[in-house]
Structure formats: structure tokens, C-alpha cells
Image: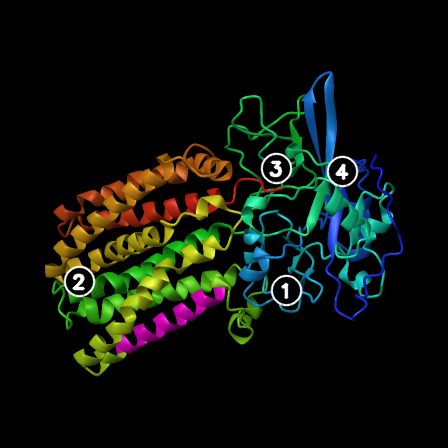
Amino acid sequence: MTAIEVPRGFTPAGAPDGAPRRLLKVIDQTRCIGCHACTTACKSENDVPVGVTRTYVKNVDVGTFPQARRAFQVTRCNQCEDAPCVAACPTSAMHYRPDGIVDFDKAACIGCKSCIAACPYDAIFINPDDHCAEKCNFCAHRLDVGLEPACVVVCPTQAILIGDPDDPNSAVAQIVNRTPVAVRRPEKGTRPKLFYRGATQATLDPLAARAPDGDGFIWTEKPTGKHNVPSGHPGGRNSSAAAVLAYDVSHNAPWDWRVSLYTWTKGIGAGGYLVALLLALAGKLPWTDPLFMWVAPILSGVFLALTAALLIWDLEHPERFIYILTRPQWRSWLVRGGIVLMGYTAALGGHLLGGLIGSVGLRQVVAVVGLPLAAMTAIYTAYLFAQAKARDLWQSPLLPPHLAVQAVLAGAGALLPFAVFMAPDAVSPLAWTLAGAALVHLLMVLGETTITHPTEHARLASHNMTHGRYRGYFWSGILLIAVALLAPIATPATAWLALPALLGLLAHEHAYVQAGQSVPLA
């Protein structure tokens, strides 16, 4: 039990000069008894539905019998000073209050789940009743009227404290300034305003409590459906006799197969026009060829429309998709990507207009902006994934060029069957382009999966992709894309080798997107 006296009478309304107080929260794990009163109080105060929680108590069994004990950790939003969820949210639904609290506006939430993907602490969820993103916000409605958060009031051991760190008389200032404290995942650079006193590494880091084989976890939670964590992982087995780690909530993957499919359709949408334009600029495809004039822009436009449809379909509030344009938060790559897609769509329209009026000059002018817009359409998802700071597998600096290579592969594969019937002279250049892109893709995948990963999180995600739950998608993708290496021998009969390559790329995208979300964060 700590010797620090905990003063009461918290008054968060404001500092003496009228400025908002800067609020921190301290959780003293030396006092926590694991009673779950904070979880119950939070649910009652904030009307949190069954099945989701703003705060919960995680328990980990540490040590070896007879020196074994159970350690607790109160887990919730870390109220980061540099919050990834705020940067990723496209509509400012996640935002900072004047006092620094990261709050949420359900009226602005479109349910894109970017904030969930961005949070390194797995602290945000979609409310199943109103389908909006939600998390702990320090009970901001109580703070505004001078009350403490519900969890602080109900804690029987005063293990949860909130206060102004600049006030030397506050309990949080005394603890943070005088005793050792820790934060979760400091390497993410989010600067959390939630500090733990007396917490063990086994509770702070979900990867610290390992199974006896040293390679995985022993899960004791109940499966929750298609999103529960990696059943194919070597440690993803159940045990009630020797539980190493137990969670009160399940780890969920925010982005499902629709996002995997979206990356594939976007690759074809970007690559169809990009490859045709590159061949035209290289003199391998006449500017007046029907494949370039009509097939490439129409093919790209169709898959671009499918991409937009998938993006909207994946929203919890698809009727609010227009908010991305009417109330944009410009740091979000969902917003920036939407602008890129609009510009690229306009370029495709200009190209088709040039075909309708028979103007080669207009198509050439459009190509000046169409080329970089097609490339940006192919690679902007890398920056969107990079905003998901929680997902270490996606933080590779090689992801933008890899997505560009995949777009070339997809575009060449989609155009090749049309070229057989409409532009025989373009078959050979397209076949070599397809084979070359497939070779570079396979080499990049080889490098990404065999190199030493910078973090354990990335290593486990890669393992889950190549040898775990998603190994079937991964290896089938490798084999199917390898078929494209035979494309240079393409004839009217063998040009359909492009189809296995496209299916293989789809399988790879699914394995990569889902494996990146498979490692637990809390």
C-alpha cells in the first residue's frame, strides 16, 4: 500500500487564471484489488452496452509456484497528447478538448474504424447500439460540472486518480513527480496521459506473457466470431489449467475482408490506366489504339467505382460518407485519399472526353496529371496504413513502392486478355510488364518475410501471415502470382494466365491486411 496520502476535493472546472486544467490520470496498481468496480461503474454511468467496455481490468498470473501471484491492470484509453486516433479520424469525430482530453463526437462519426486501427492500446470500439466509435473520455460530462469520473468515485482502494499535474497538492502530481511510473507502449511516441504505478511488464505489454514454448500465447477468452484473435497461431490454443494470460475482452480486427478487397480493386483501378499510359509514353501502344482510348480508362473507372462502393459499404454509417468532404480533417489519409480518388476520376473523365471528340492532344494533356494521380491512387493506402500506429507490420517504408508494383501487376493482368482481341501488338509488352511486376512483387515479399523484423509485434504478425491463420491465403497467393512469370509466352490461349495472377494478388492482400491486425494490443 502506498504511503502517499490521497487528497480529495478535486475541482477540475479550471485553473485560477481561467485556463483549462491539464488533466492526467494515475492508476496505482499497488492498490488495485481487481474488483471490477470501475468497469461496472463506467458501464452504468455511460450506458455502455453488453459486449463492449470503455474500461476493464486485465489480470495476468506471474511467477512460478509457489511464488506465483495475480497482477491486475486497469485498461482503457491512454488520453495521448499526440493521439493517433485524432490524426486518423477523417471527420474530427475524435478530437481534443481544451483541457487536452481526447473526446468523441458521435454526430460526426462515420464509423470508418480508422481510429480503432490507429490506437496502439486497443481502447476504442464500435458501440453496437448506435454504431459509432466510443472509448473512455475521463467522464467528460462529469468533469464539466465539477465531478470526478465514475471509476474514480467508485474505486474502493483509491487506485484510480485524476488531477492537474501542475498542482503540487494534487495526488497525481505527487505520484508522477515522486515515484516511478510507467506508460504503455512508449515507443509509439503518443505521450500518454495515463500513468501506471507499480504495474508489471506482464500487464503493460500483452506480448510479455508468453506461452511455455516461448513463441505464442495461451488464450483463455471465449471466441467472439470472425474477428477473434489468431486461432492459427501456434500459441492460439485454449488452456484452463495453466493460463498464462487472461483477457476480459477479446481482441478485434477493425477492418474485415472488405478492406482487403478494396486494396485489390484500387490496384486494378490505378494500374489499368497507369500501365496503358506508361506503354503509350514508351511508344509501345499508340495513343489512338482502342485499348488505350477506351478499355484502360473504362476498366479503371469501373474498378474505381467498386473501390468507392467498398469504402462506403465498410462504414458503420454509410449515409454519412459525405462528411469526408463536407467536414474533412486534413491530416487523415482517408480524406487525402478521397481527394486523390476524385482527382483521378476527373482525369479518367478527361481522357474519355478526348476519345469522344477525337483529340489526341487532350489525352496527352490529361496524361500530365493522370500519371501522378494514378500513381498516388495506387500508393496512398500505404500512408493510410501507416497512420494505424498499432499495426507494426504495416509500418514498412517499402510499402508505397510495393503497392505501386502491385498496381502495375494488377493493371497489366487486367489489360492483357483485352489486348489479345483488341491490340495484338500490345500483348507482348503487357506480358513482359506482368511478368516483371510479378517477379519484383515476389522478391519484395521474400524480403519482407525473411528479414529480421524491428518489433516482436511485426514478427508475430508476419508469422501469422506465413505460418498461422492466413497461411493458406498467403501461399496460394505466392503460387498463383508465380504463374504470371510465364506470361511472356502468352498467346490468345495462354493470355488467361493473367487471371491466376489477379486472384493470387487478391489472396495476398487479404493475408497481409488481416495478419497485420491479428496481434493483440491490450
**Between tags 4 and 2, which lies in front?**
4
Tell me where the magenta segment starts and ends, as one range: 334-352
Comes first in the chain, label 4 or label 3: 4
Residue 208: image quadrant is top right
Q: Of circles 2 and 1, which is in front?
A: 1
Q: Residues within 10 Å of mark 3 (few under 14, many from 20)?
A: some
Numbered disc 4: secondary structure: loop
Note whether 107 is above or below 460 in the view shown.
below
* Viewer-nearest residue: 84 or 515: 84
Q: Amino acid at mark 3?
A: Asp
Q: From the viewer's perspective, tell me whether residue 137 is left or right of residue 300.
A: right
- Residue at mark 4: 29
Ranked by sequence position, the earlier of labels 2 and 1 is 1
Residue under label 1: 95
- Assign a secondary structure to mark 3: loop
Q: Earlier in the sequence, mark 2 or mark 3?
A: 3
For residue 279, the mark is 2
Query: Can you give x and y, in whole percent of width and height, for residue 217 in the image?
Result: 58, 30
The residue lying at 64 percent from left, 34 percent from top is 201
